[in-house]
Image: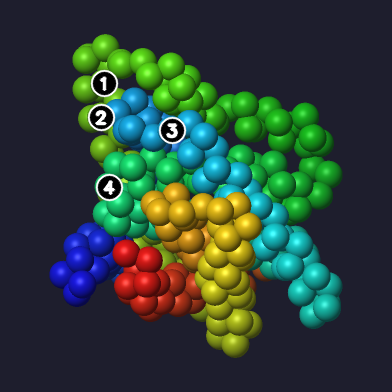
Amino acid sequence: MLSELLAILAPIVISVGAGFIWGKTGTGFPSDFISRIVMNIGSPCLIISVMAKVEVQPEVMGQVALATAFTMTAMGLFGWLLLRWMRLEIATYLPPLVFPNNGNMGLPLCLFAYGQTGLALALGSFMVMMIATFTVGLLIVANSEGGIFKRMESIAKQPVIYAMAIAVILLITDTDLPRWISNTVDLLGGIAIPLMTIALGVSLATLKIHSWKRSLLFSVIRVGGGLVLGFIVCELMGLTGVSRNVVLLQSAMPIAVFNYLLALRYGHKPEEVAAMVVVSTLVAFMGLPFLLMVIL
């Protein structure tokens, strides 16, 4: 069991650690450029590459995506009630509770735990999170800036949306890609996960921790609460096997770094959100070995 856990967690810890050391050395890291490469080239190619090869039933993919959506909705309702009770600003604290890091951490974790099938299902969960972030997330933090049509335009510009549509068509029709296209998306898609994990490490090295107590509270709610809600949703939907475990893993991910970028962009206490990102990632890393021992 120990060797199996190491095989899953070591690649993630080492690559995140490499990024963390890079960030601490003060060496320049073009975060904006890297994120654009990942979101506009790496992730779309990864989605098409994996979906074109993996043997996953479309209805199974749909169940994982739906379970993720239900879990995020439940977390949103719980978080909204909690924040109203605590009299805290919704726009600052709700997105970190709702939107987990199921890209930078969730994708490699599901890949190493369950292979290409796990990665394919995790991509379905990742897409739900991305769509929710660029719709509900922006509605929460941006107030009325730009209007709903401006936000829809932002979504329409995301290459991952079109990549997912292509991937779904390939999955449903069981179509094989021409070899030259397959080799190309394999090559370009291969950069996504390494860059995601290294960029996560750099981000953790540069973010500062403020308000330990509040950060720890919201981190435990994000990781532990997400896991509990994911478990309840899986039970209600009757999910089993790899599908269930992928939903549980993705639901238990820490706060996504993108929440910090949103808070910084719209002026919603970015220093507090940064602290929650760091602390929740530490909480997740401490809890993952125990979760994996249970579900593997």
Residue placed under numbered mark 1 in the picture = 182
Query: Label 1 amino acid?
Result: Ser
**Which of the 4 image quadrants contains residue 197?**
bottom left
What element does badge 1 sit on? helix
The answer to which of marks 4 and 3 sits earlier in the sequence is 3
Q: CA distance from mark 1 to mark 4?
A: 19 Å
Residue 115 marker: 4
Is 284 left or right of 25, judged from the image as shown? right
The mark lying in front, picked from 1 and 4, is 4
Query: Label 4 amino acid?
Result: Gly
Residue placed under numbered mark 2 in the picture = 186
Q: Is residue 47 above or below residue 284?
A: above
Query: Label 3 amino acid?
Result: Gln
Color style of the picture: rainbow
x then y, percent, for residue 228? 58, 70
In depth, the one of 77 and 265 nearer the eye is: 77
Q: Looking at this rendering, what residue extends furthest in the left direction? A: 3
Q: CA distance from mark 4 to mark 3?
A: 16 Å
Q: Residues within 10 Å of mark 2 (few under 14, many from 20)?
A: some
The answer to which of marks 4 and 2 sits earlier in the sequence is 4
Q: Is residue 10 above or below residue 179?
A: below
Q: Looking at this rendering, what residue extends furthest in the bottom direction? A: 213
Residue found 38% across the figure and 19% down from its top = 174
The mark lying in front, picked from 2 and 3, is 3
Query: Label 2 amino acid?
Result: Asp
Q: Residues within 10 Å of mark 4 (few under 14, many from 20)?
A: few
Mark 2 and mark 1 residues within 8 Å of each other at the beta carbon:
yes
